[in-house]
Image: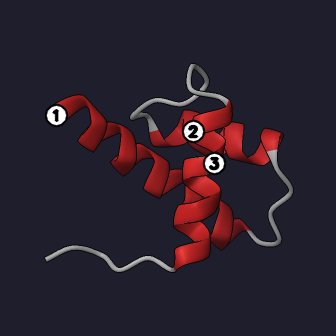
Amino acid sequence: MGNIRPTYIKRVAIELVAKYPRVFSTDFENNKAMVDKLCTVDSVKMRNRIAGYISRYWQNQQKL
């Protein structure tokens, strides 16, 4: 099974990828730094969850 993520994390992550497609990749550390730079996130935990979802999102996009 997989992780269930809240809708707001998915929404923010997909919006960021749509706006800045060349900035993100499958690398979590890079995504974490870019999420911190590109948007204001309330907590470190939320930033990490968004960056993790972006990493997973890119991995799934490459499989297609």
Closest to the observer, 43 or 18: 18
Q: Residue at x 30, y 76 (%)?
A: 3
Residue 10, compared with residue 36, is above or below; it is below
- In this rendering, would 35 be left or right of 7? right
The picture places residue 16, in percent across and down from the top left corner, at: 65, 43
Q: Which residue is mark 1?
A: 63
The picture places residue 28, in percent across and down from the top left corner, at: 47, 43
Closest to the observer, 6 or 46: 6
Q: Residue at x 65, y 58 (%)?
A: 12
Q: Amino acid at mark 1?
A: Lys
Q: Residues within 10 Å of mark 2 (few under 14, many from 20)?
A: some
Q: Amino acid at mark 3?
A: Glu
- In this rendering, would 40 be left or right of 5? right
Q: Amino acid at mark 2?
A: Val
Q: Quadrant of the N terminus?
A: bottom left
Q: Which mark is residue 3?
A: none
Q: CA distance from mark 2 to mark 1?
A: 17 Å
- Which callout, 2 or 1, points at the residue further toward the start of the chain? 2
Q: Which mark is residue 17?
A: 2
Q: Answer whether labels 2 and 1 touch (C-beta < 8 Å).
A: no
The quadrant in which residue 49 appears is bottom right
Q: Quadrant of the C terminus?
A: top left
- In this rendering, would 34 be left or right of 61? right
Q: Answer whether labels 3 and 2 touch (C-beta < 8 Å).
A: yes
Q: Which residue is mark 3?
A: 15
Is any atom of residue 49 visible in this view? no
Residue 23, compared with residue 28, is above or below; it is above
The picture places residue 57, in percent across and down from the top left corner, at: 37, 47
* Callout 3: SS: helix
Q: CA distance from mark 3 to mark 2?
A: 5 Å
